[in-house]
Image (cartoon, rainbow, N blue to C red):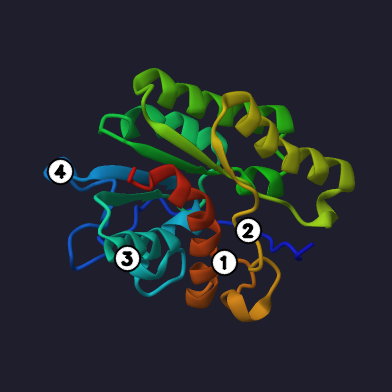
Amino acid sequence: MVAVALISCKNNPETPSTAVESGTYTTENENSTASSNATILFFGDSITAGYGLDDTNDAFPGIIQTKIDSLGWNYEVVNSGLSGETTAGGRSRIEWILNQEIDVFVLELGANDGLRGVPLSETRGNLQAIIDAVKTKSPQTKIVLAGMQLPPNMGQAYTNEFKSIFIELAEQNDIALIPFILENVGGIASLNQADGIHPNVEGHKIVAENVWDVLKDVIEPES
């Protein structure tokens, strides 16, 4: 079992800036409807937003876009990560996010809840509400849930149940699950920034692989 880093996302109400020169990787503030490509929206916290990176192209959603482009697949990545976001915060802004067409919705929230000791029932309820909102607004949208784990100092019972939330929600809703988005990154100093909690450029490359291992099967075009 890899060590788990504390993902303490700093509050930052600003959304990330535009990320790529090619124009295919956008943020939630940009108009993606002009493209004929299908949309993959990453809805998360500082991990998704690329907190602390000089170039948000280096965050894992940008790396995913580069991978997709290299394969010639017609998908546009939209980064809707917000540093400091909790599941409650995500639940409060999901309806606005759903005002755009989304073909694949990647949900990466929950770490900040766990580190703040939010009751697990609230975290579970908020994540389910976000999933329900996506399914209600767009039943054809494919949903991918990113699993998260907490360090043992949060208490064994709490950390075990926290981990199980993501597994159970994926099973109950019949959606794809990334088992642990920070696998082989969390707790490894060389793959995190000076704060020891946010992935650096090299760390995001591994996070992107963790995501891609699941996402590719969701989006791969039929032959």
Spatial CA span between label 4 and label 3: 17 Å
Badge number at residue 198:
1
Q: Is mark 1 on a helix, strand or loop?
A: loop
Disc 2 marks a residue whose amino acid type is Ile
Spatial CA span between label 1 and label 3: 21 Å
Residue beneath disc 3: 66
Spatial CA span between label 3 and label 2: 25 Å
Q: In this view, does 182 lie above or below 78?
A: below
Disc 1 marks a residue whose amino acid type is His
Assess disc 3: are there few (<14), some (14-19) or many (≥20) residues with their C-alpha within 10 Å of its C-alpha. Answer: some
User: Of residues 222 and 36, which is closer to you in this image?
Assistant: 222
Which mark sits nearer the N-terminus, 4 or 3? 4
Assess disc 4: are there few (<14), some (14-19) or many (≥20) residues with their C-alpha within 10 Å of its C-alpha. Answer: few
Which mark sits nearer the N-terminus, 1 or 3? 3
Residue 138 seen anywhere in this rendered image of the structure: yes
Can you tell which of label 1 and label 3 is closer to the viewer? Answer: 3
Badge number at residue 7:
2
Residue 101 percent across, percent down from the top left: 26, 33
Disc 4 marks a residue whose amino acid type is Ser
Q: Say if mark 3 contacts mark 2, CB within 8 Å.
A: no
Assess disc 1: are there few (<14), some (14-19) or many (≥20) residues with their C-alpha within 10 Å of its C-alpha. Answer: many
Image check: 168 left or right of 175?
right
Q: Looking at the image, which residue sits at the far bottom? A: 190
